[in-house]
């Protein structure tokens, strides 16, 4: 009797556990066919649990329903310790893993030349193909059908709108916050945040972080500001990136396409005298990647991120491999880094660039074969490298950014570049 009672109790506990799991999945909306790329835990879990589209693909493939094992397969007679039976090719590397390994090997080759950097003439096309930029399709219909406002709240002398951008392929929605003055100013600033931040923090609607509420700061400074939500918690960003690859897209391709489409749909170039982009940390890498794909913009500022994902990738591939958790930085649709050089990121830009780094002198050897290096920051050359002043990973409003916006750059330390 004691044994039967214990067995019944175990079965009851097991059933209760299953019921709780089903309830949690139901409450989190696991059946949704869309997910929004922003910083709510619910959305992340929806992304992880949204398997319907994959299951439908498998259902449509007749071969997926056939067993890989036959009656004579010895796996039918025994179980391996982990509780599953591998097929005949279980220990062969799958094609995806082979491609990913090839990309990791390629991280150390791009730009590794005695003469420093070099120019890849078809870099914009390679970049677009690697990111899936052109396979990402906006939702059909007019602009209001694609880009719509979810909520609007009052802001000092204006309002802030939550903008949702719908895509048809893949079926996702991205989010941004747009702060507008009642009387339109001359300038609008697009802000791309870095790791572990979000648009709410940038706009001062959530706790402050290393972005120092840059969106609210420059709204009060007199600009309209537009901050994009980017899934930049690294492990979940990598999950999103892997999932999007099934649709011939990537996470970074989606973020860049979002910026470019909103820029176009809102007709910002027609409404403002200057449309500028500021990216900090990994947001600066997005700024550099979108530079040859859309625009032109009045200027693009890439702040304190190129050190992480720029020359470090080419100079130290082992370091890049150890950061494989940053999947969207290195996992492209096609091998990419081994086919391009560091200087491609700045050479092919459609817009004037300001690259803020520390120290900028470290980049001389990477650019002197392609560019003529001029002394000082001049504000008129197509590319300017500017030294960071503060020892912190933050926007330097008074020290660096405001002089750039005000075209008062003669006191900034750095150098300028003009293509040879």
Image (cartoon, helix red, strand yellow):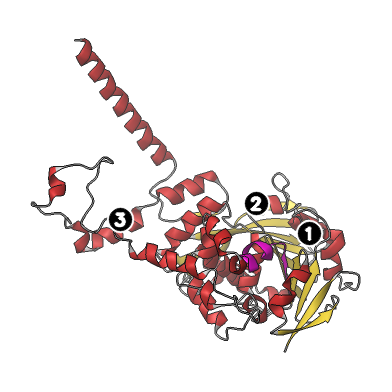
**Which comes before the other along the chain, label 1 or label 3?**
3
Of mark 1 and mark 2, the one earlier in the sequence is: 2
Residue labelled with disc 2: 197
Distance from disc 3 to disc 2, alpha carbons, whole Å, reads 33 Å
Q: Quadrant of the N terminus?
A: top left
Quadrant position of the C terminus in the picture: bottom right
Are the residues flagged by discs 1 and 3 in contact, CB closer than 8 Å? no
Give left or right: position of 220 versus 209: right
Highlighted magenta segment, given as a residue range: 298-312
Q: Position of residue 35 (x, y in %)?
A: 47, 54
- In front: label 3 or label 2: 2
Q: Which residue is mark 3?
A: 55
Nearer the observer, 281 or 211: 281
What is the residue that sits farthest to the bottom in this orientation? 420
Residue 369: x %, y % from top left: 69, 84
Classify residue 1 as left or right of residue 289.
left
**Residue matched to label 1:** 219
Q: Residue at x 28, y 18 (%)?
A: 9
| 365 to the left or right of 6 | right
- Closer to us: 193 or 369: 369
Dot 3 or dot 2, earlier in sequence = 3
Q: Residue drawn at (74%, 78%), measured in percent from left and top?
A: 352
Query: Is residue 20 found inside the magenta-colored segment of the image?
Result: no
The residue that appears at 28% across and 22% down in the rendered structure is: 10
The answer to whether residue 179 is left or right of residue 330 is right
Q: Residue at x 38, y 62 (%)?
A: 97
Residue 214, quarter of picture: bottom right
Q: Closer to us: mark 1 or mark 2?
A: 2
């Amino acid at each position: 009797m004691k044994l039967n009672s214990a067995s019944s109790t175990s079965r009851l506990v097991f059933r209760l556990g299953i019921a709780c799991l089903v309830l949690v999945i139901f409450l989190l909306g696991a059946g949704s066919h869309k997910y929004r790329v922003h910083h709510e835990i619910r959305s992340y879990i929806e992304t992880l649990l949204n398997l319907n589209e994959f299951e439908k693909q498998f259902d449509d493939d007749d071969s997926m329903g056939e067993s890989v094992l036959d009656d004579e397969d010895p796996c039918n007679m025994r179980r391996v310790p982990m509780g599953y039976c591998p097929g005949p090719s279980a220990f062969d590397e799958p094609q995806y893993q082979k491609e990913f390994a090839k990309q990791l090997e390629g991280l150390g080759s791009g730009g590794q030349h005695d003469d420093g950097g070099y120019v890849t003439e078809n870099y914009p096309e390679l970049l677009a193909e690697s990111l899936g930029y052109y396979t990402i399709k906006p939702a059909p219909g007019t602009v209001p059908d694609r880009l719509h406002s979810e909520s609007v709240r009052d802001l000092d002398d204006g309002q802030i709108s939550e903008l949702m951008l719908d895509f048809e392929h893949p079926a996702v929605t991205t989010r941004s916050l747009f702060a507008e003055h009642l009387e339109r100013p001359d300038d609008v600033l697009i802000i791309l945040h870095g790791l572990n931040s979000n648009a709410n923090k940038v706009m001062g609607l959530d706790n402050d972080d290393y972005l120092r509420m840059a969106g609210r700061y420059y709204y009060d400074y007199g600009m309209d500001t537009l901050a994009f939500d980017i899934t930049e918690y690294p492990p979940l960003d990598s999950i999103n990136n892997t999932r999007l690859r099934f649709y011939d897209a990537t996470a970074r391709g989606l973020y860049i396409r979002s910026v470019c489409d909103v820029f176009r749909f809102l007709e910002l170039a027609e409404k403002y005298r200057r449309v500028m982009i500021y990216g900090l940390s990994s947001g600066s890498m997005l700024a550099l990647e979108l530079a040859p794909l859309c625009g032109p913009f009045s200027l693009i500022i890439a702040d304190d991120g190129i050190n992480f994902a720029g020359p470090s990738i080419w100079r130290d591939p082992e370091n890049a491999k150890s950061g494989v958790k940053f999947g969207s930085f290195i996992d492209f649709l096609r091998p990419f880094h081994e086919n391009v050089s560091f200087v491609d990121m700045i050479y092919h830009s459609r817009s004037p660039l300001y690259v803020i780094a520390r120290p900028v002198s470290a980049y001389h050897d990477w650019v002197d074969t392609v560019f003529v290096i001029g002394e000082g920051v001049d504000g008129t050359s197509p590319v300017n490298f500017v030294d960071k002043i503060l020892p912190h990973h933050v926007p330097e409003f008074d020290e660096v950014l405001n002089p750039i916006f005000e075209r008062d750059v003669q006191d900034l330390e750095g150098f300028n570049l003009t293509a040879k």
